[in-house]
Image (tube, coloured by chain):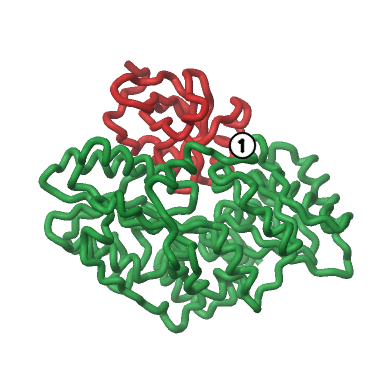
Chain colours: A green, B red
Amino acid sequence: MKYVDEFRDPELIAGASREIRRLADPGRHYRFMEVCGGHTHAIYRFGLKDLLPENVELIHGPGCPVCVLPMGRIDDGLFMAAQPDVIFAAFGDMMRVPGATGSPLEHKARGRDIRIVYSPADALKLARANPDRHVMFFAIGFETTAPSTALTLLRVRAEGIRNFSVFSNHVTIIPAIRAILDSPDMRLDAFIGPGHVSTVIGCRPYEWIARNERKPIVVSGFEPLDILQSIVMILRQMKDGRAEVENQYARVVPWEGNRAALKAIGEVFELRPYFEWRGLGFISQSALRIRDSFAAWDAEKHFLTPGVRVTDPKASQCGEVLKGVLKPADCKLFGNECTPEHPIGALMVSSEGSCAAYFNYEHRKSELVTVSA
Amino acid sequence: MCLAIPGQIIEILQERDNLALVDVVGVRRKIDVGLLAEEPAKPGDWVLIHVGFAMSRISEEDAREQMRLLKMMGEHAAAMEEITGYGLDDSVARGGP
């Protein structure tokens, strides 16, 4: 274990690992999905797979907002960026994500005004500083970032700012989990629930997973010990024949979530009837669009959005990897045509994408082993 | 974007609603605390910050652990770049006003 000496409590880690081995029935194969991309990153970064018995398998879920965005939305955003006097503002994570006509970074090199911001409030600041330009903020993220976009739009309306709009690509986590459970090729036993999304939505929205699907879900923190403890909690539930929502991350996640954040989301956004997810297809009521009362700041209404639909490159298997049906290294393009330096799919761009995480930690590790052998 | 950055509220600013000065390992920036409206933020509080907005209140110990976790995950530089990059209104020089 490469990183074991960095762990806060190596003894506790070893204890949790032993407890997992004790609880797991050797005659059974367990498939647990970690929903959140932050967990995927941590699992690879800390080599947690090495601390689990072979029959406890972690399946990487859809919780990386950059990765689930269909390519056509990037092209729609870049179409807006090509309109006169437009400044395209987005988080840095978006810059290298390829659209059909190139990534935002490549469009910047071709002369578009494309800027990185770290907060939607900074995109608003750009609009104030450039009154003769139109700032379009390419909003992305689950419930973790949607409240910040909502508060920014509330502020924009209060201040009567006109040269600002939001292209909402916000998605919601619950319908994605439902789609995965409904998918016939997915067999899952339990979920490691997202940490920071749950600070906003709380734990109640997961109750149907336990009650109707009879599958445990444990909301987890991001430390190696948090993730292992969550797996222990899941295995205990299964051993006892229970299926419950439990909160391992109670030090940060209140059971009821953040009411002010939910209120802001509700004021500004409403559910889209359906939205396309990369790899998962169209999922009903799975994304947020801007309410009519904020139409003046809705980029999809401000611009004649082309609504581009682009199919992924034929050879890439992002969809199967996103659904957890294939491991990253099983994709035909992995590590040869598709690398973090030259990504073809978004899963290879974001540090929370399972392909990038797998490439940076597992693939490079095996390369080192080969070289030194 | 999905990084949660721990910081301590230094001062609630008067220039507009819900603006606070926060300290993240010595770097001071303005963030929005409007999402903590249920129990308004006050100086000394430790918070987790997402994209320029304080999202939840945490203990000082958890703030330290979160910073340590970011270092362990190799995300520390990205987190500091994000914090340094916040330009909510105008940034304040180290040491504060």
Name the residue at 44% across, 70% down.
A276
Q: Secondary structure at mark 1?
A: loop
In terms of depth relative to the viewer, which is nearer, A275 or A364? Answer: A275
State the quadrant of the C terminus of chain A: bottom right
What amino acid is labelled 1 in the image?
Val
Q: Is residue A108 visible?
A: no
Q: Position of residue A152 (x, y in %)?
A: 33, 41
A146 or A66, which is in the foreground? A146
Image quadrant assignment for residue A35: bottom right
Q: Position of residue A48 (x, y in %)?
A: 69, 54
Residue A59: which quarter of the image? bottom right
Q: Position of B25 compared to A130: left or right?
A: right
Nearer to me, B30 or B74: B30
Q: Which percent across, then down, holds residue A255?
A: 65, 40
Question: Camera-side residue: B9 or A334?
Answer: B9
Taking the image as shown, residue B40 lies to the left or right of residue A59, namely left
Residue topped by disc 1: A252
How many labels sit on residues?
A: 1
In this orientation, does residue A107 appear?
yes
Query: Which subunit holds the residue at mark 1?
Result: A
Q: Residue at x 41, y 64 (%)?
A: A341
Q: Residue furthest top?
A: B97
**Left or right: residue B49 compared with residue B28:** right
Residue at point 35%, 18% (across, down): B96
In the picture, measured across the screen, residue A127 lies left or right of residue A290, that is left
Figure check: A19 above or below B62: below
Q: Residues within 10 Å of mark 1 (few under 14, many from 20)?
A: many
Vertical comparison of A306 with B45: above or below:
below
Percent position (x, y) of residue A222?
62, 45
